[in-house]
Amino acid sequence: MHLRAFLLTALDSATSGGRRYHLWMGTLTLIMLAGAYAYSVQLRQGLGVTGMSDHVSWGLYISNFTFLVGLAAAAMMLVLPAYVLEDVDFGRAVLLAEGVAVAALVMCLGFVVVDIGNPMGAWHLIPGLGYLNWPRSLLAWDVVVLNGYLALNLAIPFYILYSHYVGRRPAKRRYLPWMYISVMWAVSIHLVTAFLLAGLPARPFWNTALLGPRFLASAFTAGPAFMILLLWFVRRNTTYAISDGAFHKLALITTVAAQINLVMLVSELFYKFYWPTHHGINARYLFLGLDGHRALVPWIWTAIALNVTATIALMIHSIRRNPRWLMPACVTLFVSIWVEKGMGLVIPGFVPSPLGEIVEYTPTWVELGVTAGIWALGLFVLTVLVRVALPIEGGEARSPYLEGAPATRMARPRSARPRRDDTPPVRTR
Amino acid sequence: MRQGPVVGIPGSGEDLVPLQKRIDRRTALGLLAGGAVLGTQATGGCAPLRAESDEAREVRQLAWQEYIKGNYQFMTEEERAETIARLERLATLQRGADVTIRATGAQPGVVFGYAFNISKCKGFRSCVEACINENNLDRRAGTQYIRIFEMEDGEVDFDLADATFQHEVPAEGHFYLGTQCFQCANPPCVRVCPVGATWQEPDGITVVDYDWCIGCRYCMAACPYWARRFNWSAPDVPVPEVNPDQHYLGNRARKPGVVEKCTFCIHRTRQGRLPACVEACPTGARVFGNLLDPDSEIRWVLANKRVFRLKEDLKTEPRFWYFTD
């Protein structure tokens, strides 16, 4: 009966809110519907409606996939301090980080599903029923680690939230071991995704030992940057308190990761351009253009410019500690890494082809529509999760079956939850 | 909609599996999955079940059994015969094409190898055309397994080569080098496939089970020789042009959304014939044979010519050599 009440409260939390909330969810739903339409076109006519070709056989979908795996992995940067090191500042933010991980993983799986040519055959991946080529195929590894990470990030927060809901203290011995596993697992999902690309000698652009570490560095830049933005939004629009300490620490993590990421970028540029070899030809296409083909050049230099600007800004204490500057810096950093990983990592691996042919890639409206739809889905999932978690974590929503709880089941969560419209924004300074 | 027949099933379980000897776990789970299929494709515009003709009903049942079948690699001889019977029947029912699909296995004591004489090739691309016709390659997309690179005399440099030349050949100051799947002894494409839909046969040919491939295209990213092709849309071969002499692992009809590749004309070579490209070459630049037969022409080339392979540093061990006169 607690479980039923929990689900009802969750449903109630997710479906009620002010006008702005409904407008937000309605917009996301519209974008999702548009994405579903674009996907239906792709299902009917085949992947030929995308800009991909035999030469550039992965495009926007897999680019977003690799980026979002990083976002999912970055939740670890809050989980580790909060649970393992018992950091109090992060204690209240950690469930939100896990929500981000779940939303990112939902998007990852979405992008994989829309990318495969024969989605009806997806059951071939299920061991026993089909055949999973594990451990030889890194894609099989990715299937395992991504689904495992999704399960961990659903189960642990559910246990903690549910315990709070029914007025129990979550038992450490029950969730802490899983926490440790999930921290290591977070590294593994991103490393495995990097290895998926780095393990291909056919593609020298990816076939480098630096790819894995660089994936992690960029993930731990974009991930915490996103968390800062999310926590800032929560702080300003709800009564859920998040300490200044949490922001300071996250900003520091973001800054350090961004610096490491830039060091790695410089290493890569040096390696590829000091003594250019045949193996650097894809990098030449990406950064300088090749035989008049320059589709990615403006993208990558914009990304690097934004990245360097934001990183330098964050290195200045007064800027990093001032939310008015921290938030734009985080947006800039997040966008720059999305472009760098999105346009600048997967696609140049295919241009030129292993036999030197240059065929460029431009996404079509179908790809853009499906991509927007999946992002809307992820934000929708994230909003619902945050919406459900906050009242319970804030102590406002409790099981009506607890002793001393009000008699009417639905009334309590509805009235106890803070309304956006009448909640004064919390200012830090 | 070409895949429409996959949709139907409701009710009558006994109709579904006449060819199936037993309903094992796979079948049962497959049936369950079918429910989901039905849900997602409900908009597919299938006619009311009552009104459907016997033929449509048969297509529906065959397509369903095809959907739930396993990986060809792990099928018994019996299961292979059954799926081939279904596929031949479907070709007749759906396209009016009368085809024969073989399941000929690798012959003992045979490993195929290929050699390409750079001095002889003049860039006519007769091989390309023969390959398209022989292997039922998608005419609409213009799929080609073979690529002929026009290179400038003096260096083998793919960055300077042109594979899309449209002028009279042979061009002055150029030579021609053809690529296709090299049937590597250590194929990266096989290792990366998440579902084991592509594998190396005992005679060295790397094949794809088109019905097991999920279309993730990881193998395309993994191939250092750009040998794999994807069916971006439903492949189109006009019925009069269909080559009815087919092999399950070779030139049979492909579905949209799956990967395919050169199989050294598996339907011919396993019958002791030459690949179509070898037969079509007017200059005799192409040599094909059994590497395990000491008297074969390919062995003579390997023993008496200076040969090289592409990207040997990657340790993929192609079974495709280049040589000059």
Image: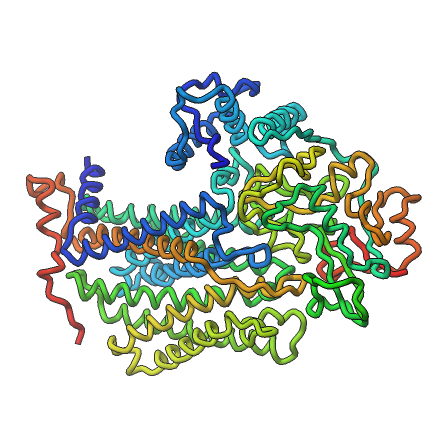
The N terminus of chain A sits in image quarter: top left
Whether residue A170 sits left or right of residue B306 in the image: it is left
Residue B279 in picture, x, y percent from top left: 82, 45
Q: Nearer the viewer, residue A114 or A36?
A: A36
Whether residue A12 sits left or right of residue B246 in the image: it is left
Is residue B64 among what the camera can see?
A: yes
Whether residue B227 sits left or right of residue A10 in the image: it is right
In the displayed structure, A406 sits above or below B100; it is below
Q: Nearer the viewer, residue B107 or B40?
A: B40
Whether residue A93 sits left or right of residue B303 in the image: it is left
Q: Which quadrant of the view contains residue B201?
A: top right
- Residue located at (58% from left, 32% from top): B95
The C terminus of chain A sits in image quarter: bottom left
- Residue located at (87% from left, 49% from top): B298
Residue A101 in picture, x, y percent from top left: 36, 55
Q: How is the image coloured?
A: rainbow
- Residue located at (18% from left, 39% from top): A5
Residue A140 in picture, x, y percent from top left: 53, 47
In the displayed structure, B301 sits above or below B133; it is below
Q: Which quadrant of the view contains residue B89?
A: top right
Instruction: List the single residue furthest toward the left.
Output: A407
Is residue A135 among what the camera can see?
A: no
Number of numbered labels in the structure image: 0
Residue B287 in picture, x, y percent from top left: 85, 49
In the displayed structure, A271 sits above or below B69; it is below
